[in-house]
Image (cartoon, rainbow, N blue to C red):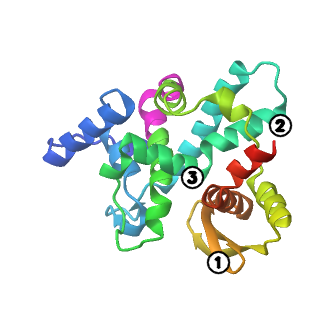
Amino acid sequence: MWHLLNITRKSSPSDKKLINAIRTIAGFKPDNLELYRLATIHSSVIKENGTGYKENNERLEYLGDAILGAAVADYLFKKFPFKSEGFLTEMRSRIVNRESLNHLARKIGIATIVQYDQKNAQLQQVILGNTLEAIVGAIYLDKGYKRTKKFVVNKLIAPNYDLDELASTHTNFKSRLIEWSQREGKEIRFEIVSIMKGKVHKEFTAQVVVDNEVAGTGYGHTKKKAEQDAAFKACERLGVFNDASRNA
């Protein structure tokens, strides 16, 4: 259906704003602007286009999620030629997890163009990463895989990750937090506090509770990813990383 979106229309101030934003975010002028416009529309402000199709970015998000994962996997496979499949999978998950994507999207300016229901406070925690995936999908349809991979590597990975440092960091934050709690005599539990259902996937919200106080809240497309995200935030807040350094 994407090809139906390439409609000739008179340029407007909103068009110019979006074109300039894509130039800033991706480094090029879009050919099919309607793809990028669609990529910015969240289902919370869903629109009916008159043909029965409800315009939102979920299909592009689905496509972008797959293309982003493939581009990152391709890059890591070539950068680490002697590392195991498990290592590559873990590295990819650390780059494309929900928290990382939200951070990247915020950093490169996606918050200036995304359209969503701003009254939903919880939505604000996850919407940016989803929109980034949708924009990756739009770039793929507009420019092809080679240009999309260049965007992923040059605009997302290279400026934002020290991969050698990332590779040397222990990543099972839930286990790390549990070990810390046992050492410190703390009571700890993980709770899934909400599940937001979308047409493409679910968004889980998890909390880590330490001695009956919320120590971290995380988000992810699976319970495991949401708990890992929550555990990471709790580790940062409670100084677990510093504690581990002192005991190393």
Q: Position of residue 102 (x, y in %)?
A: 50, 51
Check disc 2 and report the residue beneath it: 86
Q: Which mark is residue 213?
A: 1
**Amino acid residing under circle 3:** Glu
Q: Nearer the viewer, mark 1 or mark 2?
A: 1
Return the disc, 1 or 3, that comes first in the chain's sequence. Answer: 3
Measured in 3D between alpha carbons, the distance from the residue under mark 3 to the one under mark 2, in whole angstroms, is: 21 Å
**Residue 70 occupies quadrant:** top right
Q: Is residue 146 magenta?
A: yes
Q: Quadrant of residue 213?
A: bottom right
Q: What's the amino acid at mark 1?
A: Glu
In the current view of this chain or complex, which residue is farthest to the bottom? 212
Q: Position of residue 100 (x, y in %)?
A: 56, 47
Quadrant holding the C terminus: top right
* Residue marked by disc 3: 99
Residue numbers of the magenta segment: 138-149
User: Which residue appears at 33% of the width and 26% of the height?
Assistant: 28
